[in-house]
Amino acid sequence: MAVASPPSTRPAVELRGITKRFPGVVANRDVNLLVEAGTIHAIVGENGAGKSTLMKILYGMQRPDEGTIAIDGTVLSLRRPTHAIRAGIGMVHQHFMLADNLTVLENIVLGSEPDTPVVLSRRKARRRIVELGRQYGLGVDPDALVETLGVGDRQRVEILKVLYRGARVLILDEPTAVLVPQEVEDLFASLRELRNEGLTVLFISHKLDEVLSVADAITVIRSGTTVATVEPASVTARDLANLMVGHELPTPETRESTVTDTVELSLRRVTVAGAGARNALDGIDLDIRRGEIVGVAGVEGNGQTELINAVMGLAPLASGSIHLGEVDISRWPTRRRREEGIACVPEDRHRDGLLLDAPLWENAALGQQTRKPFVAGAFIDRAGARRRAEEIVETYGVRTPGVDVRAGALSGGNQQKLIMGRELTSGPRVLVAAHPTRGVDVGAQAAIWEELRKARAKGLAVLLISADLDELIGLSDTLVVLYGGRMVARLDPSGTNVDALGCYMTGTDPAGRGELDIDAVAAEVQAAHPLEVVAPSTTVEGATPIGTDRTGGGGAAPGGSGPDLTKGGPS
Ligand SMILES: Nc1ncnc2c1ncn2[C@@H]1O[C@H](COP(=O)(O)OP(=O)(O)OP(=O)(O)O)[C@@H](O)[C@H]1O
Ligand SMILES: [Mg+2]
């Protein structure tokens, strides 16, 4: 494994001896980092290793306790992001920071040109935005409201905002965690354009294959300090994982079926109204049995959010019904659903999953305040909540100095582990898990998969929504694909692959015959599904690849080779 040779060109960024302490934690310890101008430089490392902190220091959001920062060879004191922006540094955060109720243009211009007359600057701004978009493949409608945009577009807006302010060094904190493969490719194409124009890109990722495909240099951070900077050509993902965590890459394999005959959650013709004329979710039929993981694939914005909201009681059904066991819960409020055993790992951990200013022990009780061990009579049982929090921290390896720490002080991946732990330890019947390992490092990912498998073996019914197709294929017993709010495929994961899934997700025929006829395939998938709830004698058709005759090529699921859904169940 060759260490990157000393740079022949000038460094754009040079960090020397950076140390940053938080109460009970040394987030960065004597970090030295050299980033050459005109390169894509990746930073990898375990959850809590100190990656985001280091980037925040470079962006002037955190002050280092020790060390120096040089930009283009000049040592600067960056005490605020405005200082960093002036020095040509821009950052796109792990969590997007756009104002939802403003347009793309307003978001981009916001706070950057205070003294130009608004009308004048608007026209100029629009031209500049369109130009930047064209130049770097970051096209977005400047007049679109941000709340109407999907993740991929929001990210482009964030990047445009940074470029608009004249950044020459771009920091992206886990930009690909929220993207599906096609979007990742688009992003990487833009990054390469930026690099070719001489800009410097620093980006953090837990997806080592991606890092290897796009980076010119990779720096590994372990326990707050840089352990190596390597050239991608000279290492494998396995080497990187070893450098990061000291053990090997996990794979989300789970072939031993634990699926039973008992339907735990069932959706019938579930329809949720959309903003426009089309339904956001349209006539969805879905059964999840005890011990079964049903994976949902789809490009963001194709009904996943509405599906989660429908099951959790956060979106009213326009029509259709939802049963928990044999009970119709269609009209139950969210709280009752949670009390009766439906747990949820939300899509957006900051907005829906945590109280960032509350300590971990309070967060461990969130959503379960009405249940043991959190209540003792009419009171919140603090000791019970603390014990539970400690148990979660231990089992899920949440890296923290203690359970009194604010949830907001945890690193992104550790917040995710806390939520996952809280939801699983509540002993649910059904778990709705959206991106359960998003932002989680390779080691912790394996631990979360293992906990999911254990819970599944004990009879948990899981609705898994993920942008990570390998995770979906590896963990799911049954896979469905949402496209435009419709279910366009029900597949056997063992008979499918990332390419075929990608086709369904974009509404194209995996057999290479152009666009799918969505109405036809949705009807076909629906017709193939049993409509009777909880009928043990009903043999469930497992994988129902749509139009078997059409899906022969491209690695799509072969017909009739569904998983044995009755294995392990009462016969
Ligand atoms: N504002 C803060 N207050 C207290 N501790 C903090 C704060 N920010 C970060 N930390 C701690 O510093 C350490 C490094 O956190 P950081 O967010 O830099 O990790 P990371 O490498 O980005 O991890 P992840 O991959 O999970 O995002 C963690 O232990 C975290 O709990
Ligand atoms: Mg981070």
Image (tube, grey):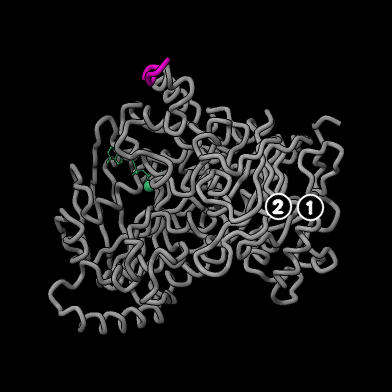
Which one is nearer the viewer's eye here, 414 or 214? 414
Crowding at dot 1, Cα within 10 Å, few <14 / some 14-19 / many 20+, comes out as some
The reply, left or right, for residue 451 in relation to residue 368 is right
Q: Residue at x 57, y 55 (%)?
A: 304
Picture quadrant of residue 199: bottom left
Residue interval drawn in magenta: 377-383
Most foreground residue, 545 or 169:
545
User: Residue drawn at (68%, 64%), measured in percent from left and top?
Assistant: 504
Q: Kindly identify the amino acid type of the residue bearing the numbered disc 2.
A: Asp
Residue on which disc 1 sits = 529
The reply to whether dot 2 and dot 1 touch (C-beta < 8 Å) is yes
Work out which quarter of the rendered image holds the C terminus and state it: top right
Q: Where is residue 515? Give x, y as percent.
A: 69, 75
Helix, strand or loop status at disc 2: strand
Q: Is residue 95 above or below residue 142?
A: above
* Element type at mark 1: loop
135 or 129: nearer the viewer: 129
Question: Is residue 107 placed above or below 49 in the rendered structure?
Answer: below
Q: Position of residue 157 (x, y in %)?
A: 37, 68
Disc 2: which residue = 285
Q: Name the quadrant containing residue 381.
A: top left
The residue type indicated by label 1 comes to His
334 left or right of 93 in image:
right
Which disc number belongs to residue 405? none
First along the sequence among labels 2 and 1 = 2
Tell me residue 508's x, y (percent).
68, 71
Q: Where is residue 290 in the image (x, y as percent from the top left)?
A: 71, 35
